[in-house]
Image (spheres, grey):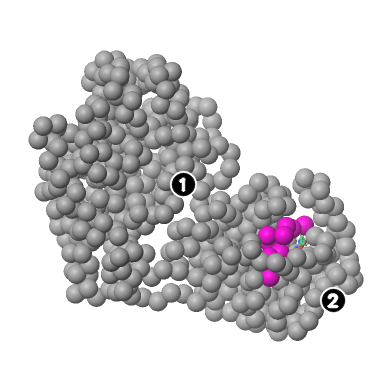
Amino acid sequence: MAKIFSLPINPKLSETQFIEFVEFCDKYRDYISDLYFTCRVPPFTQDAMGDVFMSEDDPQYMIDVALYIQEKTGITASATFNNISVRPTQENLDLWIESFKPVYAKGVRLCTLPFNHWLMTGQIQKEFPELEVRASILMDTKTPTDVYNVVTSGFHSVCIDRALMRDHDTVKTIVKIKRKNPFKLVLLANEGCLGKCPVMSEHYHYNNTRTTDSQYFNNPISRVSCPRWDVTNKAVVLKTADIPAWKEDWDEFIEMGVDIFKMHGRENVKKIYESMDIVRNYAQNKTMLYEIDLKINEHTASKWRKIIKTCKFECWSCNFCDRVAGGKLDNKAPVVADILVTSVNSDFVTTVPGISSARIDKLLNELGKISTAYLEVGCLGGRTFCSTIAGNKLNAYAVDNWKEGVAAVNESINMTVTKEDFVRNIFPYKGENTIKVFNCDFIDVDKTKIKDIDLFLYDGDHSYESTKLAVEYFADTFAKECILVFDDANWQGVVDGATAGIQKAGLTIKYEKRMLNDIEDEKMWWNGLYIVVVNK
Ligand SMILES: C[S@@+](CC[C@H](N)C(=O)[O-])C[C@H]1O[C@@H](n2cnc3c(N)ncnc32)[C@H](O)[C@@H]1O
């Protein structure tokens, strides 16, 4: 038995999940080297995972939680300071030492830091003689020389670049450094990211400098990266920087000289459960440590396992994964993911007044091009409705009760319109579309003649209940594949209401993306969007 797994403490676990996690750690303590947690003491107030703590007390709470589990299980608590946008100055080093003193005094004996300069001063070693210091993954240690430099600066263990999992020769060379300079070699194991991801460092940079804006994957800029690749590239599953599921592939790293697998899941609850499964399966000596459908046959899989030991993720020259990738892409999901990226460059503009923004107009107009039947709830003066139908050929249904005026929260717009205003506004855009208008509450719409809706926009009342009800009510009018767009996703209840409605209606999510920006930003996607492709 070897303590080979470094597991994260996830601050988002419910009480029951937390108890389960602690019991799990206790049971598998012989396999767990340490439990790492985000530690925020000055000057580290943010880190590469990008989560924003909600209250002043949270950072101290995480330290207490880590110490509690350490005491309960005997597993080392590991304080993680993963932010290279903190400046590596003498002042910041002195500040960190002062801030870390109480944490050390309470019993933390392992930490991850990102600066060679700081270790080279010897101050940390002098102040905290029992502290093991791990070199952060953010130090970009890719080559034997990088590792040698980090080790000789004073680090006791080193997280090497995750891409090295596909470069066994370099790992073997790195291990040779241990002969004269003993250190623990740490390899990331199950991040789920594309190997040599072209935006990895920018993603870290986004997180490191994040304050009040949305998490990376909720920000519109992330529409160009993994959420898109996942649905547009069949080879992603083969090019992901995860160690293959076979236990013997993990053991091969241990035999090579890797000491610890750093497991993922510090922010993502699903991921921490996946990490726990891997540890459990390893302890139970299972052949496969996790379930995955590589979508290739057994013969190709064994070829793949061999090739990726030394492919270095140099996909541009190898192309093996692209050549053998199996499975099928969905129909609509890749197109929608592409449109989310490209529609900002559309030349479409509308002059119809409404509560929206140019980027939403462009997006809807592009989505209208790939659709045949459109239903919109919450049309007001017709801005979003016109954007979708303009120049397109849709069976379009407009639903609104035109009961009361609507105002933007920021007071930039205040509109009261009637059905007649709506009809007058949309008339010039009718073109080849057929249009049916329902002047009633959406729940009173006669659905008997509505069918095959493949584009649905919900922009009515944005409460959880109303959003959920709208999906449930119109689900039987949806085509086999349908694009759902929910406006004002910034508001509490919109995304949750939408997903609850989707679940209740028994629809399957094939693709989803949040595009959240500042509240009612007319230069962005107004008040945020939630876009989902569902199958019946
Ligand atoms: C924010 S506005 C929609 C903005 C519009 N999409 C645009 O392009 O400007 C919300 C609209 O939803 C309508 N609405 C709210 N609750 C509704 C309901 N239960 N049934 C039908 N329409 C509703 C309101 O009358 C209002 O016109």
**Could one spot residue 343 in this view of the protein?**
yes
Q: Would you say residue 361 sits in the magenta stretch?
A: yes
- The answer to which of 66 and 327 lies nearer the viewer is 327
Q: Residue at x 50, y 70 (%)?
A: 334
Is residue 154 positioned above or below 316 on the image? above
Classified by dominant secondary structure, the portion drawn in magenta counts as helix
- The answer to which of 493 and 7 lies nearer the viewer is 7
Q: Residue at x 82, y 64 (%)?
A: 351
| SS category of the residue bearing label 1 | helix
Q: Are marks 2 and 1 in contact (CB under 8 Å)?
A: no
Q: Residue at x 25, y 50 (%)?
A: 164
Picture coordinates of residue 53, whole percent (x, y): 50, 35
* Marks 2 and 1, how far apart at CA: 46 Å
Numbered label attached to residue 427: 2
Numbered label attached to residue 309: none
**Could one spot residue 75 in this view of the protein?**
no
Q: Which residue is mark 1?
A: 202
Q: Amino acid at mark 1?
A: Glu
172 vs 525, left or right, is left
Q: Residue at x 52, y 46 (%)?
A: 215
Q: Quadrant of ligand 1?
A: bottom right
Residue span colored magenta: 355-365
Precedes in sequence: disc 2 or disc 1: 1
